[in-house]
Image (spheres, grey):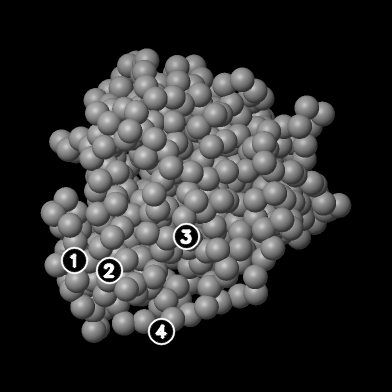
Amino acid sequence: MSGHGSRIIAALHRHAAESPERIALVGGDHRMDYASLLAAVQALAESLRTSGGTRVGIVADNGIAWALSDLAALHAGLVSVPLPLFFSAQQIAHAIADAGIDLLLIDRRLPPQMALPGTQDLSGLLPPAAASLLRLLGVPAQARPLHAATRKITYTSGTTGSPKGVCLGIEQQERVAEALAQASGANAQSQHLCVLPLATLLENIGGLYAPLLVGATTHLPSLGAVGLDGASGFDPGKLLLQIERAQANSLILVPQLLQALVAAIETQAAPLRSLSFVAVGGAMVSPTLLGRATRSGLPVYEGYGLSECASVVALNTIAHARPGSVGRPLPHLRLRIADDGEVQVSGNGYLGYVGEPAHEPATEVATGDIGHLDEDGFLHLTGRKKNIFVTAYGRNVSPEWVESELVQQAAIAQAAVFGEARPYNVAVIVPRTREPTAVQAAVDAVNRGLPDYARIHRWIAASQPFAPANDQLTPNGRLRRAAIALAYRIPLESLYEETAA
């Protein structure tokens, strides 16, 4: 058995031997049992070894092709580098050069042209089972040193600049996968539906690795089939259909998708009875939204993580949940709150960033998030350290907290809050209505639930939605605050000048 000590590969062998006909993956109309999956992974892994490459970039939509690519690289002992489809061409080119990628596995459903000079088509090396799903390209690359034990490089889009490559070993990933399988109560009969792109580390580990460890079934419809359109568009009706079709027991969502799904359930009054565990994370989740989700019958469990700790750090679970928190840390982790309130994590750190000095996995990771641990060990977050601003009256305000409440209002689609060194807070709001009075009523409703120092005193309507295309939103949905502040600098200033006058 290959797999270089991987517990995931060992699990594939075990399930293929003990339950060969159990379904492992479902992608569209294609179903793959554990025996077939192991055979396909082994064959593709041998082809990758034959090619002579060492770092495999994966450019694919969600589906069996993506899963095969990642698992084969793991089986072959190579470095896998998932490349999100929501990355721009420039970001993908940057990641390919930055990571020293020398092989590309590309989904055959994607356009055949790749803007990569000198690329060599090596598809003839692919085994028949993979050749119908993938194209294999050799990429001319200069070998770049990587941190020892690197088996995956995950690129974070961040809020500014080029994507940054986080180097992870297989141990870091498998610790999280095992903890998530236990936390969600997954077993061999479980059905997980992948909703987020598999190129995001959270779905890769929680939606593919965790189910495989316990012999469960993972459903891999395309991103379009679950309603995702680009980086920000979403049709919740399609997701509802996929949940029913798969009789899914578990999902992983970000707050924006949860909000849309809850609204759809509220409208249709159609409970999703198969679901038993819906994890939500990636950004601050409004308590109002969590309450709506619970009333809609969704078993939602908020969590928190970061790529530098192989995704999940803390998670509410079926056995231990506390609304308002992001849960207790996973068993293999230790949390410490620094003097300034920043959350520090140790026990499963990354190996380093590509091209930067190594990071010792046992040492602390500074998360950049502000929070506290309650008496029972549940973690509560209040915002990003770099985003917290101090008003002219010396009060600290986390804009994410206020924004998460604003977007729960039917009249407000997006909001960005500002107030550094100012006597009161203001906001740029993307309305869902053309009626300013409806937006003001929504702001007033939120203000009634906020302390005075966090309230929005004045606001302006955005001229267009915040989006990756106008550089006001990252591909994973986080606000680019500096870009928004610059775009609306003059009207924002006027909100204070008018009051002063």
User: Quadrant where the C terminus lies?
Assistant: bottom right
Q: Residues within 10 Å of mark 2 (few under 14, many from 20)?
A: few
Is residue 499 shown to the viewer in this render? no
Distance between mark 4 and mark 1 Cα atoms: 22 Å
Q: In the image, is 145 to the left or to the right of 82?
A: right
Q: Nearer the viewer, mark 3 or mark 1?
A: 1
> Marks 3/1: CA distance?
23 Å
The disc labelled 2 sits on which kind of residue? Thr
Query: Marks 1 and 2, how far apart in space?
Result: 8 Å
Where residue 111 appears, as percent x and y from the top left, is 17, 63
Contact between marks 1 and 2 (CB within 8 A): the answer is: yes
Q: Which residue is mark 1?
A: 125
Quick check: 173 left or right of 351? Answer: left
Q: Which residue is mark 2?
A: 50
The residue under the point 61% across, 29% down is: 316
Q: Nearer the viewer, mark 4 or mark 2?
A: 2
Q: What residue is disc 4 on?
A: 142
Residue 152 marker: 3
Amino acid at circle 3: Lys
